[in-house]
Amino acid sequence: MPSALETLVKILRLEREQGYKNTAVIGGLAGYATGWQEVAHTQARKPEHHAMIDEISDRLRTYDALENRNERHAVVSFVLDRVMRPVSTVAESLPQQEQPPKQRRPEEDERRHPDGNTKQRPPRERREANNGAPEQRPPEQRPPKKDKAGKKQAARPAPPRVQDDDDGVPVPAGIAEEDASRLDYDFIGEARVPVKRDLPPPPRLARPPRRVRNVVDVAQATDTLRGLKATVDKVRGVGTQTASQLAKVAIKTINDLLFYLPRRYDDYTQLLPIARLKPNTPATIVGMVRHSEIRIAQGGRKDCHIVVDDGSALINVTFFGMGYLLSRIRPNMQVVLRGITSTYRNRLQLTNPEWEELDPEDLQLARIVPIYPLTEGLRPKKLREAIRQALDYWAERLPDYVPEGTLERADLADLGWTLRNLHNPESWDHLHHAKRRYIFDQLLLLQLAILGNRRNWQSTPATPLEVSDEYVTSFLQAAYPYELTGAQQRAIADIRSDIAKPIPMNRLLQGDVGSGKTAVAMMALALAFGAGKQAVLMAPTGILAEQHYRNVTRTMEKMPGERKPVVAMLTGSINSAERERVYAGLADGSIDMVVGTHAIIQQGVQFNDMALAVIDEQHRFGVEQRGALRSKGRNPHLLIMTATPIPRTLALTIHADLDLSVMDEMPPGRIPIKTKVISPTGRERAYEFIEEQLKLGRQAFAVYPLVEASDKIEAQAATEAFEQLQKVFYHHKVGLLHGRMKPAEKDSIMADFAAHKFDVMVTTSVAEVGVDIPNASVILIDGANRFGLAQLHQFRGRVGRGGHASYCLLVCDSDLPEARERLTALEMFSDGFKLAEIDWKLRGAGDLIGTRQSGQSTLQLMDDMSPELVELAQRESRTIFEEDPDLHHEQHRLLAQRVNMLRDDRSDLS
Ligand code: ADP
Ligand code: MG
């Protein structure tokens, strides 16, 4: 028989599914609550269960009277949350000293759980943390720092922490496994006894705690903030030597130190003994080095080989090509290793794991240990200690710059609390809330900065451009051999209405590869011409510019009316006589349109009256280049085009200064590209397949990435592949293109490929942008698992442009099932936006933003950036901006300072 709690969970889920109409039980939930309460009490076995039952029944009894869906939703969510996470209230899980009773708001515990609070948390974390008995860890049981016992313990191999897996726990019928693992077994049924573990589970925290803030005196806060700019050697225990090591990782001030975030966290509460590790899974191992040696491999490479023992078993660990480690990893040293397990000759091994000398204190505390990015000579312990010292002083003193109302609405933690938990998370829940606040702040500041800029440049007027409907229609009819898609028409309408205003257009046109952005660009150019102005189309590479130039000339020749536009091309490869001619024509206005590359924004270029500029493949240009182009006209209208799909919410945040047109429709008749994920053993067959395509007269791309995002390593990988593929395709010609070549060289290779002077192009990620090789019908991407889906989709767009049936072969060289699963999304979807969304969910926003912010590391923790949070930050920043655009209000003064600090850091924002 299901327990009372199980039944309730089922009922509430049903209620949720039915849309909160109070139809899940006959007579309504309020009535049901009374009977349920009685039964549940008879089953309860601990005092806290009785308290929980009463709390739940009280909530449910209000249900019938609730007017709207949101309120009902809140109650259902609250109860489900309460049942799934029995010790989740703020009051219970805060360590004593964090909740001085007077400072806490009385309504804190009463507040409803925000919807989605349960959903945001990654299920894995939830499960890990909730598997055991619901007791909490006693607060703050840290031993004194230089504990002798600790040292002694360090001399023995670290005892493996026994960690229970879920195997032995029966799952209640009718409840999904994941949910079941979150239920309090002890309570639900006699048969399900919680498995003993030797570590108490980390505390739970359903929502971040917040203190009532002292009234901020801006002058005083400013003063305090100044203290943050002091150099790190002012921190206790940080001498000049440590300071100079810290400087190597760009930590110069106390502020730098406080905001130097771990790149990941190791959960010492979740260590598995070596004997229980499975192959092909990520693992963290703590053990003693039993043996170490250098092994000389083929070609003289020196590998460092060690054997690690954790008391349960031994494991072989090899660091390929890292012979120098031998002097650092010594026998009898306790180490922490983290990597992905694999097998070699039937034995488990780790290769090239991350490693660190164990700090016995971490193990003793069995806590979540922050792992910081380090540099040669900077020891983790030293860094952690410096951070701890800085936090001790600063965490409580930092004035919080985000308005309280915002924190309240977004359910975010205080700043000091956030910093403490980012560095030393008390539990995964704590870390979750801390990250949430931190990410929110970055998004908020970024957006406020961008919105401020937009307002600045919009205050300089632009020339309104107006043309008649007849002009547009006759151009459309004469110049385009096809009907425009709905998306193209909408984009054109957006542009027309933008440029008719005296405010400069700043529009982002996002459209998947092949969605027909060029046609829209062409219309934009024509609109400028129709209004008697000059216009520009700028592309990132010479070959793309030439392609556009041919298109534009061809199209503009068909312009109805007396005068046809005079079109010129300006790239790095035209001769100087021609260049002079173009310069002169642009300056005196005899040239109407210019298509080109960066050459357009060179010093010597002057326009007579340029009023509109189009930038293709925007992510290839820096913001400075956008600015340079803008300065060539009198605050011209800008149209920026990109084929890199990025989810709308994210786009609206990182491009808050741009208006967005999305081309979400493809021209008719496109043949979808057949996509297949293959394993490395399938390479030979893939080559055979490519060979067949070549025999049909088609061409092929072979993309070789990387191990790291480095031009050099990529180039190397591609060069090796080039040599190999020349042997494989010996009947055909193979060419090579990589990022370390000079632009002119790249252009000429692309041109040769386009002219079918060779058949197979071996290349790297440089081959991604809009080049048209209609005859190419197959692309092979080796090591595809290393790329984001959105980027792979870009690569895929290199083929299928000529009406031939086309193919994309993805070699997945990872054994992890997730890697392959992720790639299958490409087999299923051909919509770049859809893939970007999936990517966002699976890999975080890093891939999506990373490439377009190359060189800028302004946004951190992007992989934890959820759509929900992005939207929230967007809403809040707009609210603040609308109410107080200059951030002059008293409660925004500190915020204004932070926004200015961001502007100082990022020249592109000023
Ligand atoms: P992208 O958005 O990737 O720049 P292009 O502008 O290069 O795409 O367009 C891809 C192809 O689709 C071109 O060959 C173009 O002529 C064709 N095309 C564009 N719009 C249409 C349309 N409305 N109907 C049919 N074909 C179109
Ligand atoms: Mg294009």
Image (tube, rainbow, N blue to C red):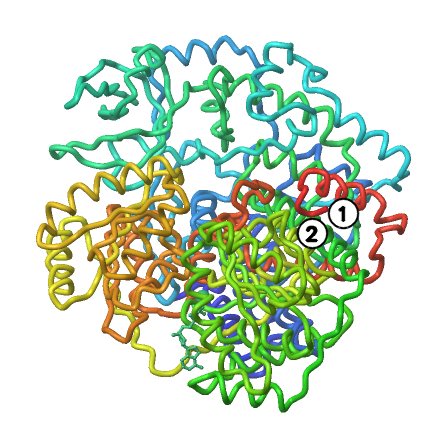
Disc sitting over residue 643 in the figure = none
In depth, the one of 257 and 739 nearer the eye is 739
Q: Earlier in the sequence, mark 2 or mark 1?
A: 1
Q: Amino acid at mark 2?
A: Leu
Left or right of 891: which side holds 830?
left
Residue under label 1: 402
Name the quadrant where ligand 2 sits.
bottom left
Image quadrant in which you'd find residue 675: bottom left
Secondary structure under tag 1 reads loop
Of circles 2 and 1, the one toward us is 2
- Residue 619: x %, y % from top left: 52, 54
In depth, the one of 760 and 485 nearer the eye is 760
Left or right of 395: which side holds 218?
right
Query: Would you call the spot at circle 2 few (<14 residues within 10 Å), some (14-19), or many (20 or more)?
Result: many
Residue under label 2: 444
Q: Which residue sits furthest front?
A: 577
Name the residue at 45% across, 33% down: 266
**Whether label 2 touches label 1, CB < 8 Å:** yes
Name the residue at 43% across, 61% down: 546
